[in-house]
């Protein structure tokens, strides 16, 4: 009898799947294995989600996530055309790897220890890897990403702060990466940026090769909503097209659960989150000192403190 796996393409048959962290069905468990936020989202975010769910789940969501992109762009001084929204940053990363890093014969540069999904996507898209060793104390040495001008490089991906090490690089160091590889995309995955690094979003208008990826899953406590986004300079010829504001470098993703509320309830989901940026991962975040935020416990490599609504 033919085995169902014999129908798979050689690429799929050879894949080593990403194994997501376990989600045990135990009530009141504070989980640390997948770096979810132990605290609930802002009540304003919940109200926006409820209202969006009541108003239009029978309809397909706005395919351009216009409200959310406008809100994100406004917050970061960008144009909506420079923001791309996907079903969690994992999907955004998948599109970015597919769109930018499949460069024949060129390896993608990645830190030796980083988010394990990068390797999975390299396998999926047949992208060879150039694994860059970490420095002492698991720090990311940006100068180790230097290559001869003639060396083939598909691009650079770093998480800042890195996961699971929690070590961050400065904006100046991000700029070193951008200048070392001006002809290729440097993707900075800022899933944990609010816990311990400075965002590179401010650099987007200055560097056409920068793509910053963020998520609502971590500091904003909305992992269940599956909303991630990327910011980069939109190609000039696409910027002005009416009704087509999406960053067209990346294809739009398939519909998914939560997409409607996530994409229409832009303002509250995005603005009302614990501002817990702190330059020292592993120490109490700045949110700990904000009115209403209580205490600071260390969860995995990042500090966590309770928001006023929890
Ligand atoms: C570094 C990093 N990037 C991206 C993600 C994906 O987050 P999401 O798909 O929930 O946006 C994670 C999740 O743990 C992560 O650790």
Image (cartoon, rainbow, N blue to C red):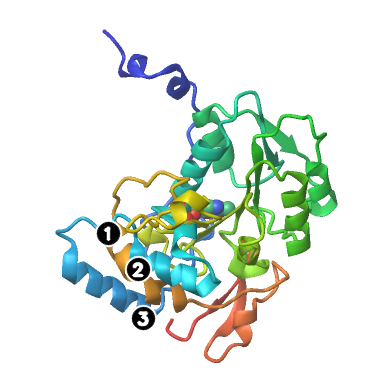
Q: Is residue 300 above or below residue 253?
A: below
1 or 3: tag closer to the N-terminus: 3
Estimate the spatial distance between the alpha carbons at disc 3 and disc 2, rounded to whole Å.
Answer: 19 Å
Q: Between 242 and 19, which is closer to the camera in this rendering?
A: 242
- Name the spot of residue 93 as percent of width and height, x first: 51, 46
- Name the spot of residue 11 as percent of width and height, x first: 47, 22
Query: Which quadrant of the rendered structure holds the N terminus?
Result: top left
Local crowd at mark 3 within 10 Å, few (<14), some, or many (≥20)? some
Q: Secondary structure at mark 3?
A: helix
Q: Is residue 18 above or below residue 72?
A: above
Query: Which quadrant of the rendered structure holds the C terminus?
Result: bottom left
Q: To which residue does mark 3 refer? A: 43
Pointer 2 with pointer 1, Cβ within 8 A: yes
Query: What residue is rendered at 62% in x and 69% in y?
Result: 195
Task: Decide if residue 258 is in sight here.
Answer: no
Q: To which residue does mark 1 refer? A: 62
Q: Secondary structure at mark 1?
A: loop
Query: What residue is rendered at 54% in x and 71% in y?
Result: 76
Q: To which residue does mark 2 refer? A: 67
């Amino acid at each position: 009898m033919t085995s169902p796996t014999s129908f798979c393409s050689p690429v799929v048959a050879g894949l080593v799947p990403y194994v997501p962290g376990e989600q045990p069905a135990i009530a009141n468990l504070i989980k640390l294995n997948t770096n979810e936020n132990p605290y609930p989202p802002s009540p304003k975010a919940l109200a926006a989600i409820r209202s969006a769910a009541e108003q239009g789940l029978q309809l397909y969501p706005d395919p351009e996530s216009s409200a959310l992109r406008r809100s994100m762009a406004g917050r970061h001084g960008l144009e909506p055309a420079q923001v791309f929204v996907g079903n969690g940053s994992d999907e955004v990363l998948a599109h970015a790897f597919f769109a930018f890093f499949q460069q024949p014969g060129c390896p993608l540069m990645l830190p030796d220890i980083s988010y394990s999904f990068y390797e999975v996507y390299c396998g999926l898209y047949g992208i060879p890897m150039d694994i860059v060793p970490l420095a002492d104390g698991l720090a990311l040495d940006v100068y180790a990403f230097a290559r001869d001008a003639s060396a083939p490089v598909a691009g650079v991906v770093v998480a800042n702060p890195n996961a699971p090490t929690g070590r961050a690089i400065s904006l100046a160091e991000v700029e070193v990466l951008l200048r070392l590889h001006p002809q290729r995309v440097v993707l900075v995955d800022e899933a944990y940026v609010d816990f311990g690094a400075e965002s590179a979003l401010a650099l987007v208008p200055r560097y056409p090769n920068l793509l910053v990826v963020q998520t609502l899953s971590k500091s904003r406590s909305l992992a269940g909503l599956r909303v991630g986004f990327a910011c980069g300079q939109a190609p000039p010829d696409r910027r002005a097209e009416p009704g087509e504001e999406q960053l067209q470098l990346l294809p739009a993703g398939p519909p998914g659960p939560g997409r409607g509320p996530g994409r229409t309830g832009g303002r509250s989901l995005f603005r009302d989150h614990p501002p817990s940026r702190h330059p020292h991962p592993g120490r109490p975040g700045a949110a700990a000192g904000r009115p209403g935020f209580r205490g600071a416990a260390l969860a995995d490599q990042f500090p966590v403190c309770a928001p006023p609504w929890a």
